[in-house]
Image (spheres, grey):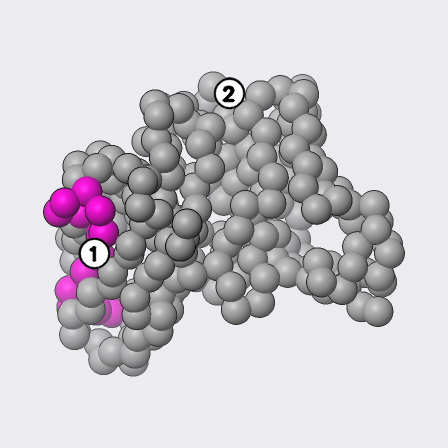
């Protein structure tokens, strides 16, 4: 079946620290992989995506590389800001599954000044 | 692009009552999805429409749940005889489906349901 496993939070970092949020997946076929972010009081927003192996998605200083050999899509940012405080969700979409997304449980990030 | 909108944003109801939620997708999007999110969890898929056709339903969608998209634009999700376990955030998403699964889904702000 299809599933996503995300590292548990909450994660608390100081401003300008390096961020890694781990995400691994199980999927039938070759999925597309996504990171969504949910800021306090707001809906889910797409942060970045990758649709095939070795693709790197990037946006707002965040990056994630689609690693087929390790079935991973870890989210990284070199220097976090207070405004990055949010909940981050890893998700996949797989062929022949009706286009539904499979989400991880989310990782809460708090960045302190 | 006004984004996906949902109404109401919050709903409090008593157990046993019926509730209906509305979702307006991004205007040119032909695919619409409903998800449910409980506290501390990621969204879980409920159902999916392509235009007006409901193509997929999760086993999470019990007989008390029904969704429609009568003209291929807005959608409604109705829960009959609500139970306390139905308390959750109900999310709607839409996408411009072109036969691929790599497409991005755009999410609305959600409707938070509390069943007393």
| Disc 2, SS | loop
Q: CA distance from mark 1 to mark 2?
A: 32 Å
| Front tag of 1 and 2 | 1
As drawn, A92 above or below B81: above
Give me the chain letter of mark 2.
A
Q: Which mark is residue A38?
A: none
Picture coordinates of residue B49, whole percent (x, y): 24, 40
Is A57 positioned to the left or the right of B55 in the image? right
Q: Which span is picked out in magenta?
A: B69-83
Is B62 positioned to the left or the right of B105 in the image? left
As drawn, B52 above or below B25: above
Q: Residue at x 37, y 39 (%)?
A: B95
Looking at the rendered image, the quarter that the C terminus of chain B falls into is bottom left
Label 2: how many Cα within 10 Å (few below 14, some 14–19, many 20+)? some
Q: Quadrant of residue B29?
A: top left
Is B82 magenta? The answer is: yes
Label 1: how many Cα within 10 Å (few below 14, some 14–19, many 20+)? some
| Disc 1, SS | strand
Seen as rendered, the residue at the extreme left is B70
Q: Which mark is residue A30?
A: 2
Q: Are marks 1 and 2 in contact (CB under 8 Å)?
A: no
Q: Quadrant of residue B12?
A: bottom left
In depth, the one of B17 and A1 nearer the eye is: B17
Q: Which mark is residue B76?
A: 1
In depth, the one of A100 and B105 nearer the eye is: B105
Q: Residue at x 49, y 44 (%)?
A: A103
Picture coordinates of residue B90, whole percent (x, y): 35, 60
Give me the chain letter of mark 1.
B
């Amino acid at each position: 079946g299809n599933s996503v496993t995300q590292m548990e939070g909450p994660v608390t970092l100081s401003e300008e620290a390096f961020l890694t949020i781990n995400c691994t997946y199980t999927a039938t076929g070759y999925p597309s992989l996504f990171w969504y972010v949910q800021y306090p009081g707001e809906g889910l927003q797409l942060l970045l995506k990758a649709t095939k192996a070795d693709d790197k998605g990037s946006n707002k200083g965040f990056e994630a590389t689609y690693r087929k050999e390790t079935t991973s899509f870890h989210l990284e940012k070199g220097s976090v800001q207070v405004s990055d405080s949010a909940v981050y969700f890893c998700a996949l979409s797989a062929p022949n599954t009706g286009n539904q997304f499979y989400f991880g449980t989310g990782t809460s990030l708090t960045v302190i000044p | 692009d006004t984004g996906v909108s949902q109404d109401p944003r919050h709903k409090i109801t008593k157990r046993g009552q019926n509730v209906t939620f509305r979702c307006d997708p991004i205007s040119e999007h032909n695919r619409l999805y409903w998800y449910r999110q409980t506290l501390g969890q990621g969204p879980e898929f409920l159902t999916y429409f392509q235009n007006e056709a409901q193509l997929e339903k999760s086993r999470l969608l019990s007989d008390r749940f029904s969704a429609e998209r009568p003209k291929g634009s807005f959608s409604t999700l109705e829960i009959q005889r609500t139970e306390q376990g139905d308390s959750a955030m109900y999310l709607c998403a839409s996408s411009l489906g072109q036969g691929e699964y790599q497409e991005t889904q755009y999410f609305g702000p959600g409707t938070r349901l509390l069943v007393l």
